[in-house]
Amino acid sequence: MGKHIDKNNWPIWLRDDDSVVACNEKIKMMKENFDEIKQIVQDALEDGLLMEVSEIQMREALHALIEELVNPYQKNNSN
């Protein structure tokens, strides 16, 4: 369900229970973070292409980078 897109082309942010994050300050921060991330990643892609790195390899590396991110707040269900 996290694929819903708002007018800014970012998802409508949902909690794990599928309720909507409605706090304007949280939404603003998420938009700013994702706008910044998008620009940094776009710049990195363009730099790689200018240096003749394969576009396919660049995209695979960027996807792998996302998959390697760690959730430091992950709930531990072993209690």
Image (cartoon, rainbow, N blue to C red):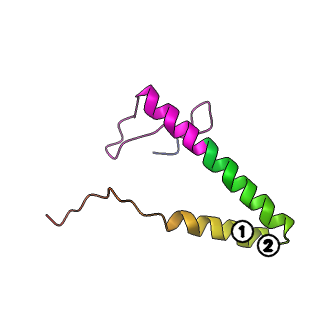
In the rendered structure, the answer to whether residue 73 lies left or right of residue 54 reads left
Q: Could you tell me which secondary element the residue under label 1 belongs to?
A: helix
The image quadrant of residue 66 is bottom right
Q: Is residue 33 magenta?
A: yes
Q: Image quadrant for the N terminus?
A: top left
Q: Position of residue 11 (x, y in %)?
A: 53, 40
Q: Are marks 2 and 1 in contact (CB under 8 Å)?
A: yes
| Pointer 2 residue | 54
The three-letter code of the residue at mark 1 reads Met
Q: Residues within 10 Å of mark 2 (few under 14, many from 20)?
A: few
Q: Image quadrant for the C terminus?
A: bottom left
Residue range (magenta):
5-34
| Pointer 1 residue | 58
Residue under the image location 62 percent in, 38 percent down: 9
In the rendered structure, the answer to whether residue 4 lies left or right of residue 75 reads right
Residue under the image location 63 percent in, 45 percent down: 36
Q: Position of residue 75 (x, y in %)?
A: 26, 58
Q: Residues within 10 Å of mark 1 (few under 14, many from 20)?
A: some
Magenta: main secondary structure: loop
Q: Could you tell me which secondary element the residue under label 2 belongs to?
A: loop
Whether 47 is drawn above or below 33: the answer is below
On residue 45, the disc is none
Residue under the image location 51 percent in, 32 percent down: 28
The image quadrant of residue 22 is top left
CA–CA distance between discs 2 and 1?
6 Å
Residue under the image location 63 percent in, 65 percent down: 62
Whether 67 is drawn above or below 13: the answer is below
Q: Position of residue 59 (x, y in %)?
A: 69, 66
Disc tally is 2
The three-letter code of the residue at mark 2 reads Ser
